[in-house]
Image (cartoon, rainbow, N blue to C red):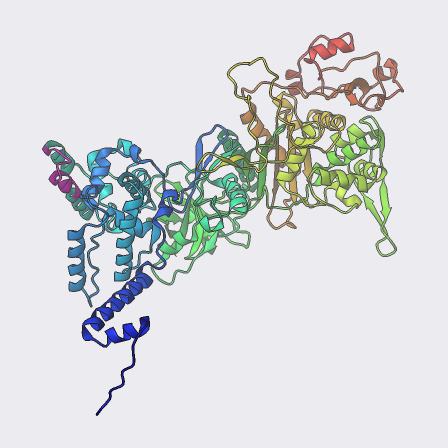
Amino acid sequence: MSVTLRRETTGFWPGVRARLAKRRYRWPLYLLLMTLMGMLAFWWVFMRDLPSADSLLDYEPALPTFVRDVNGEPVQSFARERRVELAYEEYPPVLIRAFLASEDSSFFTHGGLDYPGLAAAVFDYIAKMGSDERARGGSTITQQVAKNLLLTNEYSVTRKIREAILAVRIENVLTKEQILELYLNQIFLGRNAYGVQAAARAYFNKDVADLEVHEAAFLAALPRAPANYNPSRFPERALARRNYVLDQMRENDWLNEADWQEARARPLGTTRTSQSVTDNVDGYYMEEVRRILIDSFGEDAEDGPYGIYSGGLWVRTSYDPQMQDSAQRSLREGLLRFDRGRAWAGPVATIPMDDDQWQSRLAAANLTIDYEDWRVAVILSKDENTARIGFADGSTSTMPRSAASIARRSGGTAFSTIQPGDIITVRPEGNAYALAKVPDISGGMVVEDVRTGRVYAMQGGFSSSLEAFNRATQAERQPGSAIKPFVYAAALENGMTPASIIVDGPFCVYQGAGLGNKCFRNSGGGVAGPQTLRWGLENSRNLMTVRAASETGMENVTQLISRAGIGDYEPYLAFSLGAGDTTVLRLVNAYGMLANHGRDVGPSLIDYVQNRDGEVIYPANWRACEGCNADDWDGERMPRPPMPGRQVVDAMTAFQMIHILEGVIQRGTATLLRDLDRPMFGKTGTTTGPTNVWFVGGTPDIVAGVYMGYDRQNRSIGYGAGGTLAAPIFRQFMQETLEGRPVIPFRAPRGIRMVRIDRRTGRRVFGGWPSDSPQSAIIWEAFRPDSQPTRTIRRDVLARRPIRRIDPNEAQNTVTVDRPTNDNEFLQSEGGIY
């Protein structure tokens, strides 16, 4: 008898194993596992790191930064991608139909994928495998949005599958109109134009709303390959592609027969060169604005949401086009006047000429000049009598020997020393060109509003397109005598008055056993004995300045100079004569502080910056002035914005200094400006050598400053001074700028006492009155309360003074008025002093 033992199989896993032993269960399970693994692999390869389609709801394309001037007009744009963002409703129907006809005629009916087109693209890809040919795309507009905004431009099957998945997701997140809006704002269409509006400006200098049918069709022809349909290089190819788009519009019944025929008959009509949204003014001012924006926000999206080339910022500046043109013209003409008759310094730069690539090398040098009809050229060849020159656009011309006969500083003439590869500046002369000499000397100029510190104009050299170094903000130079008002302001703050007597005599200081005595001297030599503080500043006397600084204490002087923002100097007497470095911008702002009753608001080029949504993001402490723009008074208290800035110098001291600096114009070192015939202050400056010459001054509302000098700081400019070289530049600017402006007097702060004194001795006068002559023996002087002189001068002493003969030209400009009989009458005749 045989017995078979059988183990009972109970539980889950034993049951599974029993079923897997049977083929009818095993193969379906393997199939399920393979499917799951395939899905996992598909997800890992194609979907694992796909970006979210929801991100397109908040997508913000890179937009350029636009800069507006003081009047609110656009004057500059900063962009790497030229783009103007529009809403879907702003695109005209004819343009939308043109793009649909060209790229995706079934856009409004498919769900993100065009399956017949996709199948054709797959077969085309298989047919071209192994060749260098690129298969047709077959992408819908939704797929193009996915590729352009969320993926890369990689040519692969993997990217194509990922693109298709994203397209379906996008269709589930966005409406058709939203997808089309993204597409039309993002697509690249050549000429650095991203988006259709930017392309319309680039190719036709029109807005999209003004495009005609044939123009819209041309733009719709570009997405596939903008470079291949460049109208300048391939006009026939571009015309054929445009007509294809028109044919597709007709086939889809989006054009009637007459409009189709008319559009096909039209030429392309594109402009030869790309048109900018704004006519960029460029220049030193805008480059300084760009630097400030980059320091504050960065350049691109990687630096933050407000990058200057991607953040779509709107920047309001204090740039005044008229003042900028005047400042630029005045400085240039002053530099040309000085440089006239001097030797040629040599070529601007040099490029290799060992092959025929001179045009690309000249263009890569990125050198242009924005003065009159001057151009930058390169010497291509030269024989005994003529030089052949070439320009960045590929054109050529000639320059005869006689047109380049300027002497060169190193010897010989310019023509004899130029060689092929030398980059020079030229100007048209007849049918050829002549050498144009860019001044070797340079300089800088700044114009600022006294009360607000807004910088209206800035010129940092002869041409910013030829030399980027901004001498208005970057050149550290010694101001010379232009620093003296701040030395005397420190003296006034420490007990002196404009009538204080200071000896204009020898002054030496002991510097130690190794150095011995250091003796100062006046610029023209000689001494004048005891004189008033006013006289010393009006005539820029060095000996009186160092003596005043010594009596005041150089620590007090340098502290005031530092508070004024001019510079931080050691307490050495040499700094009282302008031995410390500063910039034009800092010195002009310091003079503006004096004219603003000692209150420093700081220089500013940018009023405010708005992001693409209109929110003010700069300056950080910006606050809207509620009620300031009300149409009418509402019966409530008037809005009073807080006073900006900080008090650097006592208001009465600042006014005293401005009052003295008016004397510099009337009878001091800047009498050249007297015939401008309006209240004006200023001070000249000349450094040892001389190496730099300055003039800084202005009116009650505008302050400006200019300096001239070589970039090599130890190079002397020869004979000259601030009053003869810099002041004429200032004068030309003020003549052009002040024409038609009202004459505004300087306003005295509360507490100032206007007292009649003898100009020579500083003593108080009771029996006489100031005359209209700048050389009047009696003048009105500004004093703090209880600081006016108590000693008087007798009328008979004044009568014995020799009478100064007035020049006939001066006499013609002298106006005779009835003299007031008392102080009150004087104040009324002057319009009051407040």
Magenta-colored stretch includes residue 249: yes
Q: Residue furthest left?
A: 257
Count every numbered label the image shows and give the total: 0
Q: Residue furthest front?
A: 1
Q: Residue furthest bottom?
A: 1
Taking the image as shown, residue 833 lies to the left or right of residue 69, namely right
Residue 515: x and y in percent read 84, 54
Quarter of the figure that contains the C terminus = top right
Rendered image quadrant of residue 23: bottom left
Taking the image as shown, residue 219 lies to the left or right of residue 506, namely left
Residue at left offset 47%, top offset 38%:
611
Task: State whether the magenta stretch is mostly helix, strand or loop.
Answer: helix
Magenta-colored stretch includes residue 48: no
Residue 201 in sight here: yes
Instruction: Pick the residue in front: 466 or 80.
Output: 80
Residue 238: x and y in percent read 20, 46
> Does 326 sit above or below residue 771?
below
The segment highlighted magenta reads 245-257
> Does 8 sit above or below residue 821?
below
Residue 198: x and y in percent read 33, 40
Residue 298: x and y in percent read 50, 47
Residue at left offset 31%, top offset 56%:
153
Quarter of the figure that contains the N terminus = bottom left
Residue 383 in sight here: no
Instruction: Pick the residue in front: 793 or 589.
Output: 589
Taking the image as shown, residue 708 lies to the left or right of residue 504, namely left
Instruction: Pick the residue in front: 644 or 27.
Output: 27
